[in-house]
Image (tube, grey):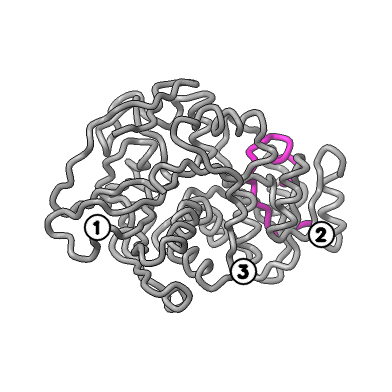
Protein backbone atom coordinates (compact mmCIF):
# COMPACT_ATOMS: atom_id res chain seq x y z
CA UNK A 1 0.00 0.00 0.00
CA UNK A 2 1.05 3.62 -0.37
CA UNK A 3 2.10 5.77 2.57
CA UNK A 4 3.36 9.35 2.84
CA UNK A 5 6.69 9.08 4.64
CA UNK A 6 8.83 11.73 6.33
CA UNK A 7 12.54 11.29 5.59
CA UNK A 8 13.87 14.66 6.73
CA UNK A 9 13.62 18.41 6.28
CA UNK A 10 11.47 19.12 3.19
CA UNK A 11 11.77 15.48 2.23
CA UNK A 12 8.46 13.61 2.17
CA UNK A 13 7.88 10.70 -0.18
CA UNK A 14 4.90 8.69 -1.31
CA UNK A 15 6.18 5.15 -0.95
CA UNK A 16 5.02 1.56 -1.05
CA UNK A 17 5.00 -0.09 2.37
CA UNK A 18 3.92 -3.50 3.59
CA UNK A 19 0.29 -3.89 4.63
CA UNK A 20 0.35 -4.57 8.39
CA UNK A 21 -1.18 -7.72 9.76
CA UNK A 22 -4.02 -7.53 12.27
CA UNK A 23 -3.05 -9.31 15.47
CA UNK A 24 -4.92 -10.48 18.52
CA UNK A 25 -6.78 -7.65 20.25
CA UNK A 26 -6.14 -5.30 17.34
CA UNK A 27 -8.07 -3.72 14.49
CA UNK A 28 -6.79 -2.67 11.09
CA UNK A 29 -7.99 0.78 9.98
CA UNK A 30 -8.00 2.15 6.44
CA UNK A 31 -7.57 5.97 6.76
CA UNK A 32 -10.29 8.06 5.12
CA UNK A 33 -9.30 11.68 5.81
CA UNK A 34 -6.09 12.98 7.37
CA UNK A 35 -5.65 16.55 8.52
CA UNK A 36 -2.34 18.37 8.02
CA UNK A 37 -1.35 19.65 11.44
CA UNK A 38 0.93 22.54 12.31
CA UNK A 39 3.24 20.00 13.92
CA UNK A 40 3.49 18.13 10.62
CA UNK A 41 4.35 21.41 8.92
CA UNK A 42 7.04 22.26 11.49
CA UNK A 43 8.61 18.84 10.96
CA UNK A 44 8.53 19.32 7.19
CA UNK A 45 10.14 22.75 7.38
CA UNK A 46 12.75 22.13 10.05
CA UNK A 47 12.64 18.52 11.23
CA UNK A 48 13.25 16.09 12.47
CA UNK A 49 12.37 17.83 15.75
CA UNK A 50 9.71 15.71 17.40
CA UNK A 51 9.94 12.72 15.10
CA UNK A 52 12.58 10.30 16.42
CA UNK A 53 15.85 9.80 14.57
CA UNK A 54 16.72 6.92 16.91
CA UNK A 55 14.28 4.19 18.01
CA UNK A 56 11.35 5.65 19.95
CA UNK A 57 11.02 4.40 23.52
CA UNK A 58 7.51 3.08 22.93
CA UNK A 59 7.28 2.15 19.25
CA UNK A 60 10.88 1.26 18.55
CA UNK A 61 10.54 3.14 15.24
CA UNK A 62 12.53 6.03 13.80
CA UNK A 63 12.63 8.22 10.69
CA UNK A 64 11.53 7.54 7.99
CA UNK A 65 8.00 7.45 9.41
CA UNK A 66 4.49 7.66 8.04
CA UNK A 67 2.89 11.07 8.65
CA UNK A 68 -0.61 11.75 9.93
CA UNK A 69 -2.20 11.86 13.41
CA UNK A 70 -5.46 13.76 12.72
CA UNK A 71 -7.32 11.01 10.92
CA UNK A 72 -10.59 9.21 10.48
CA UNK A 73 -10.97 5.82 8.86
CA UNK A 74 -12.82 2.58 8.39
CA UNK A 75 -12.25 -0.72 10.18
CA UNK A 76 -10.99 -3.21 7.58
CA UNK A 77 -10.23 -6.16 9.83
CA UNK A 78 -10.92 -7.15 13.41
CA UNK A 79 -8.49 -9.31 15.33
CA UNK A 80 -9.18 -12.17 17.68
CA UNK A 81 -10.68 -11.12 20.98
CA UNK A 82 -12.19 -7.86 19.68
CA UNK A 83 -15.96 -8.09 20.02
CA UNK A 84 -17.06 -4.46 20.38
CA UNK A 85 -16.33 -3.35 16.81
CA UNK A 86 -16.69 -4.76 13.32
CA UNK A 87 -15.45 -4.32 9.79
CA UNK A 88 -16.98 -1.31 8.07
CA UNK A 89 -17.23 0.77 11.23
CA UNK A 90 -16.02 4.33 10.71
CA UNK A 91 -13.61 5.56 13.34
CA UNK A 92 -11.42 8.34 14.59
CA UNK A 93 -8.42 7.45 16.75
CA UNK A 94 -7.04 9.33 19.71
CA UNK A 95 -3.37 9.13 18.70
CA UNK A 96 -1.55 9.47 22.02
CA UNK A 97 0.86 6.62 22.73
CA UNK A 98 1.47 6.12 26.44
CA UNK A 99 2.82 3.37 28.69
CA UNK A 100 0.14 3.42 31.39
CA UNK A 101 2.70 2.69 34.12
CA UNK A 102 4.51 5.98 34.84
CA UNK A 103 3.39 8.39 37.55
CA UNK A 104 1.70 10.74 35.07
CA UNK A 105 -0.29 7.93 33.44
CA UNK A 106 -1.37 6.50 36.80
CA UNK A 107 -2.63 9.97 37.71
CA UNK A 108 -4.66 10.07 34.47
CA UNK A 109 -2.31 12.45 32.67
CA UNK A 110 -1.72 10.28 29.60
CA UNK A 111 -0.68 13.37 27.63
CA UNK A 112 2.25 13.81 30.02
CA UNK A 113 3.51 10.22 29.88
CA UNK A 114 7.24 9.89 30.54
CA UNK A 115 7.59 7.94 27.27
CA UNK A 116 4.81 9.58 25.32
CA UNK A 117 4.50 9.57 21.58
CA UNK A 118 1.97 10.00 18.81
CA UNK A 119 0.70 7.76 16.08
CA UNK A 120 1.86 9.53 12.91
CA UNK A 121 4.79 11.23 14.61
CA UNK A 122 6.46 8.48 16.63
CA UNK A 123 5.52 5.50 14.48
CA UNK A 124 2.28 3.73 13.68
CA UNK A 125 2.11 1.03 16.34
CA UNK A 126 0.68 2.66 19.47
CA UNK A 127 -0.04 -0.04 22.03
CA UNK A 128 -2.40 2.22 23.92
CA UNK A 129 -3.72 4.64 21.35
CA UNK A 130 -7.23 5.81 22.11
CA UNK A 131 -9.74 5.11 24.87
CA UNK A 132 -13.28 3.94 25.51
CA UNK A 133 -16.14 6.29 24.74
CA UNK A 134 -19.92 6.19 24.61
CA UNK A 135 -22.35 7.50 22.04
CA UNK A 136 -24.52 10.40 23.16
CA UNK A 137 -28.28 10.19 22.83
CA UNK A 138 -28.22 13.44 20.85
CA UNK A 139 -25.98 11.90 18.23
CA UNK A 140 -28.17 8.78 18.12
CA UNK A 141 -31.25 10.95 17.57
CA UNK A 142 -29.70 13.16 14.91
CA UNK A 143 -27.86 10.36 13.07
CA UNK A 144 -29.65 7.01 13.53
CA UNK A 145 -27.43 3.96 13.28
CA UNK A 146 -24.24 5.50 14.65
CA UNK A 147 -22.17 3.81 17.34
CA UNK A 148 -19.22 4.85 19.47
CA UNK A 149 -17.34 1.87 20.84
CA UNK A 150 -13.91 0.64 21.88
CA UNK A 151 -10.97 2.87 21.09
CA UNK A 152 -12.63 5.41 18.83
CA UNK A 153 -15.81 6.67 17.22
CA UNK A 154 -17.60 4.21 14.96
CA UNK A 155 -20.00 5.36 12.28
CA UNK A 156 -21.57 2.47 10.35
CA UNK A 157 -21.95 3.29 6.65
CA UNK A 158 -25.75 3.33 6.76
CA UNK A 159 -26.25 6.46 4.66
CA UNK A 160 -23.34 7.11 2.28
CA UNK A 161 -23.73 10.88 2.06
CA UNK A 162 -24.20 11.27 5.80
CA UNK A 163 -21.22 9.07 6.57
CA UNK A 164 -18.99 10.87 4.09
CA UNK A 165 -19.75 14.20 5.74
CA UNK A 166 -19.25 12.82 9.20
CA UNK A 167 -16.01 11.04 8.31
CA UNK A 168 -14.43 14.31 7.20
CA UNK A 169 -15.67 16.01 10.38
CA UNK A 170 -14.18 13.21 12.45
CA UNK A 171 -10.74 14.26 11.20
CA UNK A 172 -11.30 17.62 12.94
CA UNK A 173 -11.90 16.12 16.37
CA UNK A 174 -8.20 15.87 17.24
CA UNK A 175 -7.39 19.61 16.84
CA UNK A 176 -10.71 20.56 18.44
CA UNK A 177 -9.84 18.35 21.42
CA UNK A 178 -6.56 20.25 21.84
CA UNK A 179 -8.50 23.48 22.25
CA UNK A 180 -11.15 21.86 24.44
CA UNK A 181 -8.48 20.55 26.79
CA UNK A 182 -6.73 23.93 26.92
CA UNK A 183 -9.92 25.72 27.97
CA UNK A 184 -10.70 23.00 30.52
CA UNK A 185 -7.22 23.28 32.01
CA UNK A 186 -7.41 27.07 32.22
CA UNK A 187 -9.13 28.92 35.09
CA UNK A 188 -11.74 30.28 32.65
CA UNK A 189 -15.25 30.59 34.06
CA UNK A 190 -18.37 32.00 32.46
CA UNK A 191 -18.27 35.78 32.59
CA UNK A 192 -14.52 36.01 32.08
CA UNK A 193 -13.00 38.02 29.25
CA UNK A 194 -10.53 36.11 27.07
CA UNK A 195 -7.73 37.06 24.68
CA UNK A 196 -6.71 34.57 21.97
CA UNK A 197 -3.39 35.01 20.18
CA UNK A 198 -3.51 33.62 16.64
CA UNK A 199 -6.35 32.82 14.25
CA UNK A 200 -4.94 29.56 12.90
CA UNK A 201 -6.60 26.15 13.37
CA UNK A 202 -5.99 25.90 17.13
CA UNK A 203 -6.85 29.54 17.79
CA UNK A 204 -10.11 29.14 15.88
CA UNK A 205 -10.81 25.92 17.78
CA UNK A 206 -10.29 27.82 21.06
CA UNK A 207 -12.78 30.47 19.92
CA UNK A 208 -15.37 27.80 19.15
CA UNK A 209 -14.79 26.07 22.47
CA UNK A 210 -15.15 29.33 24.39
CA UNK A 211 -18.36 30.06 22.53
CA UNK A 212 -19.77 26.66 23.53
CA UNK A 213 -18.86 27.42 27.14
CA UNK A 214 -20.71 30.74 27.08
CA UNK A 215 -17.89 33.27 26.80
CA UNK A 216 -19.33 36.65 25.80
CA UNK A 217 -16.07 38.60 25.46
CA UNK A 218 -13.63 36.87 23.11
CA UNK A 219 -10.80 39.06 21.80
CA UNK A 220 -8.54 37.77 19.02
CA UNK A 221 -5.17 39.12 17.93
CA UNK A 222 -4.41 38.19 14.32
CA UNK A 223 -2.63 39.78 11.35
CA UNK A 224 -3.97 37.92 8.31
CA UNK A 225 -7.19 39.41 6.81
CA UNK A 226 -8.77 36.04 5.95
CA UNK A 227 -8.05 34.60 9.36
CA UNK A 228 -9.62 37.68 10.93
CA UNK A 229 -12.77 36.86 8.98
CA UNK A 230 -12.64 33.25 10.18
CA UNK A 231 -12.26 34.47 13.77
CA UNK A 232 -15.39 36.59 13.48
CA UNK A 233 -17.27 33.78 11.74
CA UNK A 234 -16.49 31.33 14.55
CA UNK A 235 -17.53 33.69 17.33
CA UNK A 236 -14.90 36.31 18.22
CA UNK A 237 -16.46 39.52 19.53
CA UNK A 238 -13.40 41.68 18.91
CA UNK A 239 -10.65 41.09 16.34
CA UNK A 240 -7.49 43.17 16.67
CA UNK A 241 -4.49 43.52 14.37
CA UNK A 242 -1.16 43.68 16.27
CA UNK A 243 0.43 45.57 13.36
CA UNK A 244 -2.15 48.33 13.69
CA UNK A 245 -3.62 48.13 17.19
CA UNK A 246 -1.99 48.62 20.58
CA UNK A 247 -3.04 45.18 21.84
CA UNK A 248 -2.40 45.88 25.51
CA UNK A 249 -4.26 49.20 25.50
CA UNK A 250 -7.20 47.87 23.44
CA UNK A 251 -7.63 44.75 25.57
CA UNK A 252 -7.65 46.84 28.74
CA UNK A 253 -10.15 49.22 27.17
CA UNK A 254 -12.45 46.34 26.20
CA UNK A 255 -12.08 44.73 29.63
CA UNK A 256 -13.11 47.65 31.84
CA UNK A 257 -9.60 48.97 32.20
CA UNK A 258 -8.28 45.80 33.88
CA UNK A 259 -7.23 43.46 31.09
CA UNK A 260 -8.36 39.96 30.17
CA UNK A 261 -8.97 37.29 32.80
CA UNK A 262 -7.41 34.60 30.62
CA UNK A 263 -5.30 34.59 27.46
CA UNK A 264 -4.50 31.64 25.18
CA UNK A 265 -1.33 31.69 23.09
CA UNK A 266 -1.92 29.69 19.92
CA UNK A 267 0.69 31.61 17.94
CA UNK A 268 4.04 31.05 19.64
CA UNK A 269 5.56 34.41 18.70
CA UNK A 270 7.74 36.47 21.05
CA UNK A 271 5.95 39.75 20.34
CA UNK A 272 2.61 38.10 21.08
CA UNK A 273 3.88 36.65 24.35
CA UNK A 274 5.14 40.06 25.43
CA UNK A 275 1.78 41.66 24.65
CA UNK A 276 -0.31 38.91 26.24
CA UNK A 277 1.53 39.05 29.58
CA UNK A 278 0.75 42.75 29.87
CA UNK A 279 -2.78 42.41 28.51
CA UNK A 280 -4.01 40.09 31.28
CA UNK A 281 -5.22 41.59 34.52
CA UNK A 282 -3.87 41.14 38.04
CA UNK A 283 -4.01 37.41 38.88
CA UNK A 284 -4.88 36.69 35.26
CA UNK A 285 -3.55 33.61 33.47
CA UNK A 286 -1.76 33.14 30.17
CA UNK A 287 -2.17 29.62 28.79
CA UNK A 288 0.42 28.47 26.27
CA UNK A 289 -0.84 25.97 23.67
CA UNK A 290 1.70 26.75 20.96
CA UNK A 291 4.70 24.53 20.28
CA UNK A 292 7.59 26.97 19.97
CA UNK A 293 10.28 26.56 17.34
CA UNK A 294 12.88 28.28 19.50
CA UNK A 295 13.31 29.49 23.05
CA UNK A 296 11.29 32.50 24.18
CA UNK A 297 12.15 35.08 26.83
CA UNK A 298 9.94 36.21 29.67
CA UNK A 299 10.67 38.76 32.41
CA UNK A 300 9.48 37.16 35.68
CA UNK A 301 8.72 40.57 37.20
CA UNK A 302 5.89 40.94 34.69
CA UNK A 303 4.28 38.04 36.49
CA UNK A 304 5.41 38.69 40.05
CA UNK A 305 4.19 42.22 40.67
CA UNK A 306 0.71 41.52 39.27
CA UNK A 307 0.53 37.92 40.52
CA UNK A 308 -0.08 36.71 36.99
CA UNK A 309 0.26 33.06 36.02
CA UNK A 310 1.80 31.41 32.97
CA UNK A 311 0.92 27.78 32.31
CA UNK A 312 1.42 25.21 29.58
CA UNK A 313 -1.06 22.69 28.21
CA UNK A 314 -0.44 19.65 26.02
CA UNK A 315 -2.86 17.87 23.68
CA UNK A 316 -5.72 16.20 25.62
CA UNK A 317 -6.73 13.54 28.12
CA UNK A 318 -9.43 10.88 28.24
CA UNK A 319 -12.83 12.53 27.94
CA UNK A 320 -11.83 15.46 25.76
CA UNK A 321 -12.62 13.66 22.48
CA UNK A 322 -15.99 12.63 23.89
CA UNK A 323 -16.79 16.19 24.97
CA UNK A 324 -16.06 17.44 21.45
CA UNK A 325 -18.28 14.74 19.94
CA UNK A 326 -21.08 15.68 22.34
CA UNK A 327 -20.78 19.35 21.43
CA UNK A 328 -20.93 18.55 17.71
CA UNK A 329 -23.90 16.23 18.29
CA UNK A 330 -25.83 18.92 20.14
CA UNK A 331 -25.15 21.48 17.42
CA UNK A 332 -23.27 23.75 19.82
CA UNK A 333 -20.02 23.12 17.96
CA UNK A 334 -20.16 23.48 14.18
CA UNK A 335 -16.62 23.14 12.82
CA UNK A 336 -17.27 22.11 9.19
CA UNK A 337 -16.11 25.46 7.78
CA UNK A 338 -12.64 24.84 9.20
CA UNK A 339 -12.09 22.55 6.21
CA UNK A 340 -10.79 24.85 3.48
CA UNK A 341 -9.36 22.31 1.03
CA UNK A 342 -9.31 18.58 0.32
CA UNK A 343 -6.40 17.08 -1.62
CA UNK A 344 -5.14 13.67 -2.73
CA UNK A 345 -2.07 11.91 -1.36
CA UNK A 346 0.06 12.81 -4.39
CA UNK A 347 -0.75 16.51 -3.85
CA UNK A 348 0.30 16.73 -0.20
CA UNK A 349 3.58 18.56 -0.74
CA UNK A 350 2.49 21.01 -3.45
CA UNK A 351 -1.14 21.70 -2.44
CA UNK A 352 -0.76 20.86 1.21
CA UNK A 353 2.53 21.77 2.87
CA UNK A 354 3.62 24.41 0.36
CA UNK A 355 0.16 26.00 0.42
CA UNK A 356 0.33 26.22 4.20
CA UNK A 357 3.75 27.87 3.89
CA UNK A 358 2.97 30.36 1.12
CA UNK A 359 -0.81 30.84 1.47
CA UNK A 360 -1.55 29.90 5.06
CA UNK A 361 -3.57 33.06 5.63
CA UNK A 362 -6.36 31.72 3.40
CA UNK A 363 -6.52 28.25 4.90
CA UNK A 364 -7.50 26.68 8.19
CA UNK A 365 -7.50 22.91 7.79
CA UNK A 366 -6.42 21.03 4.68
CA UNK A 367 -7.57 17.41 4.61
CA UNK A 368 -5.92 14.65 2.64
CA UNK A 369 -8.47 12.32 1.06
CA UNK A 370 -6.99 8.85 1.36
CA UNK A 371 -10.01 6.56 0.99
CA UNK A 372 -13.03 8.83 1.62
- CA distance separating discs 2 and 1: 56 Å
Between disc 1 and disc 3, whose residue precedes?
A: 1
Earlier-in-chain disc, 3 versus 2: 3
In this figure, which residue is indicated by the disc labeled 3?
213
Q: What whole-number distance in Å separates the C-alpha atoms at marks 1 and 3?
A: 36 Å
Q: How many marks?
A: 3
Q: Quadrant of residue 17?
A: top left
At which x and y percent is residue 281?
Answer: 75, 56
On screen, residue 40 versus residue 209, left or right, reads left
Per the rendering, the mark at residue 67 is none
Q: Which of the two residues, 326 or 79, is positioned nearer the viewer here?
A: 79
Q: Is residue 178 magenta?
A: no
Residue found at x 24% / y 63%: 85
Q: CA distance from mark 3 to mark 2?
A: 22 Å
Secondary element at image label 3: loop
Do the residues bearing badges 1 and 3 touch, measured as CB atoms within 8 Å? no
Disc with the residue nearer the chain's start (2 vs 1)? 1
- Percent across and percent down for residue 341 are 58, 43
* Stretch of the chain drawn in magenta: 258-276
The label nearer to you, 3 versus 2, is 3
* Local SS, label 2: loop
Q: Quadrant of the N terminus?
A: top left
The reply, left or right, for residue 182 in relation to residue 81 is: right
Identify the residue at horizontal 86%, vertical 52% (top origin).
250
The residue to which callout 1 is attached is 87
Provide the secondary structure element on which disc 1 rests: loop
For the residue carrying disc 2, how many other residues have a C-alpha within 10 Å: few (<14), some (14-19), or many (20+)? some
Image depth: mark 2 or mark 1 in front = 1
What residue is pinned by disc 2?
258
Residue shown at 36% from the left, 57% from the top: 91
Amino acid sequence: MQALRFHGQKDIRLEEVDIPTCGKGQVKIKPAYVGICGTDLHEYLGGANIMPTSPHRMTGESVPLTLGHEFSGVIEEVGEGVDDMKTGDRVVVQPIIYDGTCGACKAGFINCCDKNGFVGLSGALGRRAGGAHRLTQELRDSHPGLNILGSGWYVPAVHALMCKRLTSLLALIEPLAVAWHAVNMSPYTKGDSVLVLGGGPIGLAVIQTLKVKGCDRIIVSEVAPRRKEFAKQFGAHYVLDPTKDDIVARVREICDGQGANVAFDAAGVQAGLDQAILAIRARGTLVNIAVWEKAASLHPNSLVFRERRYMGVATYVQGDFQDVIDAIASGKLQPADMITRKISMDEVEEKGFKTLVHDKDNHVKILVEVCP
